[in-house]
Amino acid sequence: MSLEVIADLTVLYNEPLAKYTAARLGGPADTVAIARTRQALLEAVIYAHQQHIPYWVLGGGANVLVADGGVRGLVIINHTKGVEIDPATGRVQAESGVSLITLARRCLVQGLKGLEWAVSIPGTLGGAVVNNAGAHGGDMAGNLVQAIIMDIEASYEPSVWPVERLAYAYRYSILKGQHQYLVLDATLQLEAGHDPHELTVTADGFIAHRKRTQPPGASLGSMFKNPSGDYAGRLIEAAGLKGHQVGGVQISPIHANFFINLDAGTATDYHALIELVQSQVLARFGVELELEIELLGDK
Ligand SMILES: Cc1cc2nc3c(=O)[nH]c(=O)nc-3n(C[C@H](O)[C@H](O)[C@H](O)COP(=O)(O)OP(=O)(O)OC[C@H]3O[C@@H](n4cnc5c(N)ncnc54)[C@H](O)[C@@H]3O)c2cc1C
């Protein structure tokens, strides 16, 4: 058995990961496998587990900083796309590789209310389920009914997890950082029977707000979690670091919690800025900023 025999799976060797991440940087993975179906995704993960090959599943790579040295092992890119929408009941079932933005748009044009918050969040449904992604007062915890998840340490048989089992909190689920779980599908409950035009106006308002307050360009969104009762961006700005640049990466002059890959930036540049921000904010305000993003690969 080898990866190449799995149907609907494209296998690439020594493949640079920059094009699979929102920050548009990162060294090569030994192997990249792009899964176009749920079965291919499942089989690739099981293969890696059985062969004791270190592996990572990525959706849109919108929340991971891949090291310049790349990743030893297998990176599985989730391109599953199946979506079933019932406009009468508001039930939505989708595979985890679906783009969250696309899904949100598809729901609102069918008059389903509840996912407008997601129209500008990059990444996949799977990543959003893991991270409890959210914005504009909404989040995945507010929409999810259940997910189909494989816990590879328990069984190769996926099972249904009701939302309560995910123990959702702010940008947190029990799956986060726990490598053994694979999200395959998610079922959402939205409100049926709304005016698509009104929903579109709301969604477009969210996008316009983002354009006013957040910078364009290649980034990973918010780098640090907001500490209790404060904002990471405010602290970084107060430490005098807004606009500071290392190599090709800049702390955005528009929003200091966004680090923009301006021009051929590297993960090393990102790391230098992360360390600078953490040490300056700690020294000036006694606050330890915790990363919101995840780090992947050899530094
Ligand atoms: C410009 C910008 C703006 C952003 N704004 C927001 C925002 O407003 N709110 C917000 O919440 N986030 C925001 N983010 C962060 C990001 O969009 C979310 O964290 C998103 O949910 C990540 O999804 P992804 O598919 O890209 O996950 P990835 O980055 O690919 O993966 C993230 C983690 O989830 C795991 N994972 C991914 N898919 C699966 C799966 N199917 N099964 C198991 N594990 C999986 C990965 O292994 C990894 O550990 C922003 C990012 C950017 C670049």
Image: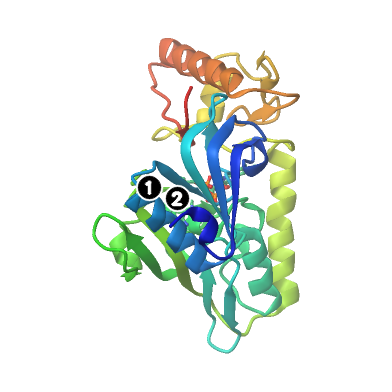
Residue 24 lies, with reference to residue 151, above or below; the image says above
Q: Where is residue 65 in the image (x, y as percent from the top left)?
A: 54, 33
Would you say 112 lies left or right of 248 here?
left
State the residue at coordinates (62%, 64%).
116
Name the one closer to the observer, 209 or 244.
244
Identify which residue, 52 or 151, lies in the foreground: 52
Residue 264 appearing in the image: yes
Local packing at callout 2 (Cα closer than 10 Å; few below 14, some 14-19, many 20+) is many
Q: From this view, report whether residue 97 is shown above or below residue 58.
A: below
Specify whether tag 2 is near ligand 1 (CB below 8 Å): yes
Q: Is mark 2 on a helix, strand or loop?
A: helix
Q: In this view, does 88 lie above or below 242?
A: below
Q: Mark 2 points at which residue?
A: 131
Q: Name the residue under label 1.
A: 176
* Residue farthest to the left, as pictured: 154
The N terminus: image quadrant: bottom left
Q: Residue furthest front?
A: 1
Position above or below: 222 against 93: above
Report the side of 13 relative to 204 (left or right).
left
Q: How far apart are marks 1 and 2 (CA)?
A: 6 Å
Which amino acid type corresponds to the residue marked 1 in the rendered image? Lys
Indicate the position of residue 155 as horizontal and vertical percent values: 26, 63
The answer to whether the residue bearing label 1 lies less than 8 angstroms from the nearest atom of ligand 1 is yes
Per the rendering, the mark at residue 238 is: none
Lower position in the chain sequence, tag 1 or tag 2: 2
